[in-house]
Amino acid sequence: MAIPNPSLVSLPRSHSLPTPNPNSITLNNDRYFANHPTLSLIDQCSETKQLKQIHAQMLRTGLFFDPFSASRLITAAALSPFPSLDYAQQVFDQIPHPNLYTWNTLIRAYASSSNPHQSLLIFIRMLHQSPDFPDKFTFPFLIKAASELEELFTGKAFHGMVIKVLLGSDVFILNSLIHFYAKCGELGLGYRVFVNMPRRDVVSWNSMITAFVQGGCPEEALELFREMETQNVKPNAITMVGVLSACAKKSDFEFGRWVHSYIERNRIGESLTLSNAMLDMYTKCGSVEDAKRLFDKMPEKDIVSWTTMLVGYAKIGEYDAAQGIFDTMPNQDIAAWNALISAYEQCGKPKEALKLFHELQLSKTAKPDEVTLVSTLSACAQLGAMDLGGWIHVYIKKQGMKLNCHLTTSLIDMYCKCGDLQKALVVFHSVERKDVFVWSAMIAGLAMHGHGKDAIDLFSKMQEAKVKPNAVTFTNILCACSHAGLVEEGRTFFNQMELVYGVLPGIKHYACMVDILGRAGLLEEAVELIEKMPMAPAASVWGALLGACTIHENVELAEQACSQLLELEPGNHGAYVLLSNIYAKAGKWDRVSGLRKLMRDVGLKKEPGCSSIEVDGIVHEFLVGDNSHPSSKKIYAKLDEIAARLETIGYVPNKSHLLQLVEEDDVKEQALFLHSEKLAIAFGLISTGQSQPIRIVKNLRVCGDCHLVAKLVSKLYDREILLRDRYRFHHFREGHCSCMDYW
């Protein structure tokens, strides 16, 4: 439904606003029938059917045509614990001359409903049909409706009307305006209303403090609280909820503890909402111990209390404690399930997230919602679990859930990371509304699959659609240029970021640019770019340079990059591994031994390579030399067969790649053939049909020997192999890879 034009709202019958009638009935004060026995029955009703019976009796006796009596019926229909706005509207339409109280009641009910547009339409009818002009009780409800709709222009029109009819000093209306402007993202206008108020009550201060907190200005909220103290305005529980939220957003633990003691000293009425706000503050400030002490003392707990504790434990990595809270909860609503699933997914435990999702499906205690599905799709993306991801896509359709931007982005990301770029494109093109994150996700998908030119074309279409790119978009488009070797295009995008699009290049963009130049062998230009950076280079920048040195075997520059990287991240085992590989390729075996010894001395171990493959909805994981799988005998038999067939076409293992396993000094030569991705390929060959692609996810960069073997296997066995490593996708088909050996 279209929002009413504010110009219609402000001009009821003439070109100027009528002066309010001081004798108009603004309250229900015409109470001739107030004690009528029929009206007393209205308060005893517990369902709409009973109201309708009284309505019929009022029509028979003529009582309905008394404005006060009719307003009692309207109020019960619209604002009771069992409201029926459709019925209230029908009753209202039967009243010959509704009084102002009745108009206000209906406006108020719609303003708080799921259809606040109707509140504005009722107001327009009132301007044209009622002899009474809106009063100080009308405007707060209208402003609330504009706030729910986030209609800035309409709300401003109401603000103007308020001033014209001399209600500009009414504290209730001004408090509504503060909330309205904040909801519309106009904190400055809301603060101007607050500052210019002739009189402020505690609600005024609370409204402004809450507005600052929700608007991402916690420091201003705390400053306002301090000013409130100097003005001798006594804060209440709502004030303290806002102040605690500000502390949580700032992670200001010390001030948060002071606020807790302030609440106790001033005996500010404790409530469940206030206790939950304190719990939230402690968990977000990282002090689960304080939160647990408070939690144990709370006389009353609700689902929010339990969920807050669950999230607190999950946030600091204490998953057993989080699971314990979850198992102990008296009621596990979907918010609790979501909190734990999201915690596992965000902390790199996708298997646990999917296990919990399966438990949710079996539990029957709650139903997955949008938040559940977004987290679960992300876990599927991490593991390459496309069967489950595809099932969720079907579930969304069957449940009639609207594909909003969050779900769309998650589906695109899942399909891309599971290796099905075409399905990701189908999802992308199927939705009408695409925000910047949907476009960016699709560009990222094309980038990781090596479709650099297509990613650039999509970026151009994004401009045509008038969607402004953000920092994430540029990270993705620069990655596309890097994976496809599009150096000139990368330079152009990087140089246009601030000048053309107003996006300031950040660390990630510089790291991408160093990667683009480094991969192309332009190491001097990459170093020059690092030296000119307006901020200190982060570990990702030095890591990109070190990776490029590995490709082009530049020992001297690699040593410099590694030194800088380890200074920032002393525990970065990947830096040692890369430098060790460079030394090995250069034949500097003494330095290889020195690095291995240094890693042992500082207690560092190389991250073990792990490859996963989904078969019939089950994700199977393999480590190097893994023999724990139930099908190990068949897998190793297949590996022997592969080795024999490879030997017949002249394949010779590249032994230099053994050096990546720097912590395992006793590795035998044949261990090269036991890399995790080779085990996963063998398992894929024995457990999937000839027409099915073998989809593998590797947690590290695929080594050169495994890359060569995958190409050869794809030709020998006529199988398509899709291998996702830490950086990109490799599509192996008929002896070739989509990366063209540029990775």
Image: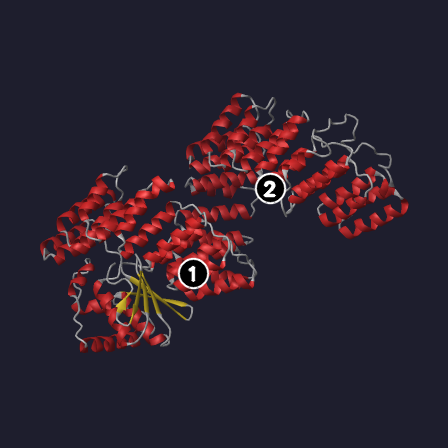
Q: Position of residue 251 (x, y in %)?
A: 42, 37
> CA gap, disc 1 to disc 2?
35 Å
Mark 1 secondary-structure assignment? helix
Q: Position of residue 57 (x, y in %)?
A: 87, 48
Give neighbour class at mark 2: few <14, some 14-19, many 20+ (Cα, 10 Å). Answer: some
Q: Nearer the viewer, residue 522 or 604?
A: 522
Is 705 on the left or on the right of 26, as rendered? left
Q: Which residue does the numbered mark 2 point to in the structure image?
A: 148
Mark 2 secondary-structure assignment? helix
Q: Which residue does the numbered mark 1 point to in the structure image?
A: 425
Is 298 on the left or on the right of 60, as rendered? left
The answer to whether 41 is drawn above or below residue 371 in the figure is above
Closer to the eye: label 1 or 2:
1
On-image quarter of the C terminus: bottom left
Residue 603 seen in this snapshot? no
The answer to whether 18 is drawn above or below residue 741 in the figure is above
Quadrant of the rendered image containing residue 678 = bottom left
Quadrant of the rendered image containing residue 170 = top right
At a point 20% along the width and 54% down the height, the residue shown is: 578
Q: Amino acid at mark 1?
A: Leu
Tag 1 and tag 2, C-beta contact below 8 Å: no
Residue 520 seen in this snapshot? yes
Q: Which of disc 2 and disc 1 is earlier in sequence?
A: 2
Q: Position of residue 638 (x, y in %)?
A: 27, 76
Q: Amino acid at mark 2?
A: Glu
